[in-house]
Amino acid sequence: MAPSNPNEQVLQGTLDLLILKTLSLAPMHGWGLTHRIGELSGQALLVGQGSIYPALVRLEQRGWIDTEWQSTENNRRAKYYRLTAAGRRAMSGELASWKRFVGAMDLVLSAGS
Amino acid sequence: MMRGRPLGVIRSVASRIRELFQHRRLARELDEEFRLHIELEIEHRMKSGMSPDEARRSALAEFGGLRSRTEDTMDARGFVALGNFARDMRFAVRRLRRTPTFGAGVVAAMAIGVAAAVGVGALVFQVLLRPLPYDHPETLARVLVRTPGLGTNSTESSGGLFVLFRERASSFAALESYYQSEGVSVTDGDRPEHLSAAMISPGALGMIGARPAAGRLFDAADAVAKPSPVLISYDVWMRRFDGDPNITARTIELNRSSRRIAGVLPRGFDFPSPSIGVWYADEVSADRAGLNFRYLNVIGRLRSGATASGAQVELAGLASRLSERFPEVSAEELRASGLAVSVETLKDATVAPVRAELTLLAIMVAVVLLVAASNVATLFLLRAERMNGEVALSRALGASGAALARRFVAEGLAVGIASSLVAWPLVSAMLASKFGLSAAQLPRAHEVASSPGVVIALVSLTVGLGVALGLVGLVRAGDGVIGGRIRECGAGARARGWRWTQRALVVLQVASAMALLFGTGLVGQSLWRLGHVDIGFNPRSATTFDVSLPFSQYPNFDDGAAFDLALLRGIGALPGVQAVTTAMTLPFDADIPSLRRRIVTEGESEPREATARPNVVPVGYFETMGISIRAGRSLAAGDAAAPEPGIVVSASLAQILFARGEAIGKRIRIPDSRGYPVYRVVGVAGDVFGERIQDGVMPTLYFPLLAEAGPRRTAGVAAQDDRRFPYDPNEMRFVVFSDLPASTLMPALRRAVTSIDPKVPVSNVSLLAGIVAGASAHARLMMVLLAIAAGAALLLSAIGVYSVIAYAVGGRTREFGVRLALGATPRQVVVSVLRDSTVLLAAGVAAGVAASFAGSAAIRSVLFEVNPANPAAYAVAIATIVLVSAAAAYIPARTAGRTNPTIALRSD
């Protein structure tokens, strides 16, 4: 059951990376994406619908993702998002900077222990 | 961090441009996508055990309003402003309609302020600033001649001075003259008509760059031709000649002599005034060089490189040597006259009479605009405060800064457009009415009109203001986002800065309203005094009209007098007419400088002199008009024929001429080459005023209108030296006291005139009451404008005080709750809030007093017998502003006192 307020606020800027990474696994529609992120994070990261769609629009405008109307397994029309080549390159860049960030955080937090 | 890549930027722009054309499809797709999302979510929730209803409700609640989510997502697309304009505007209008009080308030405040500013701004621009509609108007100058020593404030030149200037002045490439006559009667056809006429030197029209609509302008030969040809106005051309293209082959009968028409001046031609119907060529001669006969308006074209001040020095030097050129003007006379010449650019000279009033008016509306703008700014700021949370939320939901900016700007724009729609009818009404000012009161009045420029000014001002205010709101609302503060926005130092801005605006509003109230008080007092001045006659219900007798048909005083007296008898015999009288000038008539005469006492040990307005009146004039006789007697039969004709002088003239006030039996003379007789004062009449009461009473000389006035003449002009009076009763104004409606009275009056002479036109029909009201119309207009401005400013400042205090109170609910919970009485809370507003008020009043003091110099010229350093006006203005502001502050203060402590403390 999804709580109405995500207990973990997705950090500004990290949402893009989460979306890119998730889409790199498989093309997906919007609802699927929110659920997949939830699943993959063990329900720790819950992305609000209000954030996911504007973020998808932004990414599409940057040319990092592509859209296509396809049928779902239940034969419903849905808009699927897919990573583009540019998106894949962007993802690796974002990933690298995220790792640098986490590493830096780690260094600070583990100082003196 | 990756946005900087050039490829990414191009792709992003390309994608947006594509979206611009696909807006509708994208919106539909988004809708479909969201629907699917919700359906999938509902299914998912049902699978995890919710009932269908519960699943649907919770999913929908979580997703939020489908529509607003669509808007947020669309905003995130950051549509190019142009393509999105209509959508943004629709959105803005919808938002404004959701808060109708705010919407109506800002639109009304802005429309009032902008309408006043643009209307008056257009008037001031068109009258004071716009160049005159002539060729190279900047090098046209007017020559003004003043002779304070002769007791007159006229600025006309004498023939002698004009000839002297023309012969010797090197600063001018051309010098021309003109004057307006009393007018002429068009006597051909069956429609006698009275036209205003101008006598101009032949080169005058060419000098200002006039181009004829038909025919030609004057040339030098026209002035000496007999009979000389005339020019007619476009209006006369159309009305009397149906625009005949062959007009130069036609003639017009003026004062019963036929004249060739040399040409037609263009439509709207306004030199020397737009009312002129006929122009005569009149070459000035110096046969009357004396300074006491001055009637010429002199204008000139400055030579290139010459300045008005340089020309003034030159002409003053020339004028001081007038006696050398014209020995009949003695050096003694010249010195005593205090002759002073000034040269002003034509525009400065034209607008000088209203410069002070218009400047004051401009300051006034600038203040109203300032108050209105600051008020709207305050409202936008307060609203922005409230929208702070909303903005932060939109931002968190992914709306871009640009989208937010667009939203605010669109709102400002919507307000701007709405206010220009409201303001436009106000502006065009103001300009069409010319603020109630007549052509006589407002130079260039005929040039005042709405124009595309006015529309552009209005739209750019409202839209500019609207957008600026939208941006102010955005910057303020943006504060909440920057700090991530959605609720505690009132706490930061930045917010304090904003609060100071609001307070400064309110101080400004209070000060402006106070200054305007002060001005209204002064003008109100002035108006009251004007209304209580003894106007010197009894303004009963009466109709006035003018008749004009052509000199060629009525060459002698007695001819004119015979007509006038016959008409008086004819009208007096009409049923329903209680009384009738006539005079050359009536009370409140404009002063005609060329009619004034210098007079000197005769046979006194110390001769005195004065300049007086002359009048010619029949027996019974004073009694019929209700003008008192202060001493001696009224005019009577025999006065005109006496060897020393009997005259009546006004009390003010008696005062000037005979210091001890013993005027009766004293003798006066008109110093003129033509040897008028010596006159004997038989009575002293009460004073009446000229055109403006403010200018004071008119020293007046009353000559008798009696059919016994002098020897017969046949050739008119030739026999002028035999005249007993300096005026002929050919241009008389009749006053008919009657209760009959105009529709009955006027035809009867016309019949009375035509039964004596069918070719004499009746003109200038008006009501005596209107003439009386006209005398204070100017002051009343100022009063009305000031009162409207002050009322608007007062209302706006009350709204300003209210909103600032209400806002402050809203932010301190918790504090009041705590205070009340700790035992403060509601009264103490109310008082503490009011104390807060007292500071604002005190600052506003202090600034208002300073502004009033500074502004009193500007208002002095429009006041009548009221000293601007007026404690009563200050007191009333301060009391009004304090009362209204206190009332405005009390409403939120009372709310503060009623704060419920439990609720206030609970609300996080």
Image (cartoon, rainbow, N blue to C red):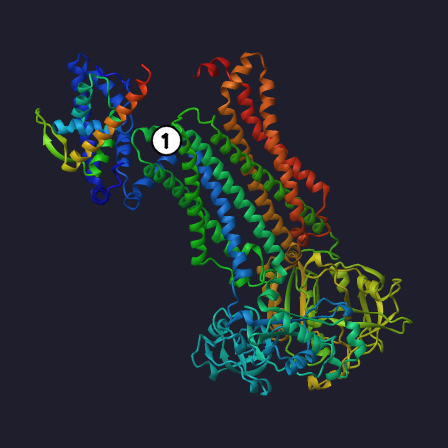
| Whole-percent x, y for residue B18 in the image | 20, 44
Image position of B861 with respect to B147: above or below: above
Instruction: Give the percent coordinates (x, y) of residue B822.
Output: 56, 12
Q: Is residue B687 visible?
A: yes
**Label 1: few (<14), some or many (≥20) within 10 Å?**
many
For the N terminus of chain B, the quadrant is top left
Front one among A66 and B338: A66
Amino acid of disc 1: Val
Residue A72: % across, % down: 9, 27
Q: Is residue B702 visible?
A: no
Q: Secondary structure at mark 1?
A: helix
In the rendered image, the quadrant that contains the C terminus of chain B is top left
Residue B167 in which image quadrant: bottom right
Give the residue displayed 48% in from the left and 82% down from the top.
Answer: B250
Most extreme residue toward the right is B605
- Residue under pointer 1: B391
* Left or right: B37, with B832 as reference point: left
> Residue B844: x, y in percent?
61, 37
Q: Is residue B636 above or below residue B50?
A: below
The mark total stands at 1
Question: Residue most toward the front?
Answer: A112
Left/right placement of residue B317 relative to residue B453 reads: right
x 57%, y 66%: residue = B347
The relative height of residue B695 versus residue B477 in the rendered view (above or below) is below
- Tell me if B291 is positioned left or right of B906 in this view: right
Subunit of label 1: B
> Residue B138 appears in which quarter of the rendering?
bottom right
**Along the line of sight, the residue nearer the viewer: B825 or B321:** B321
- B78 with respect to B131 (left or right): left
Q: From the viewer's side, name the closer residue of B627 and B39.
A: B39
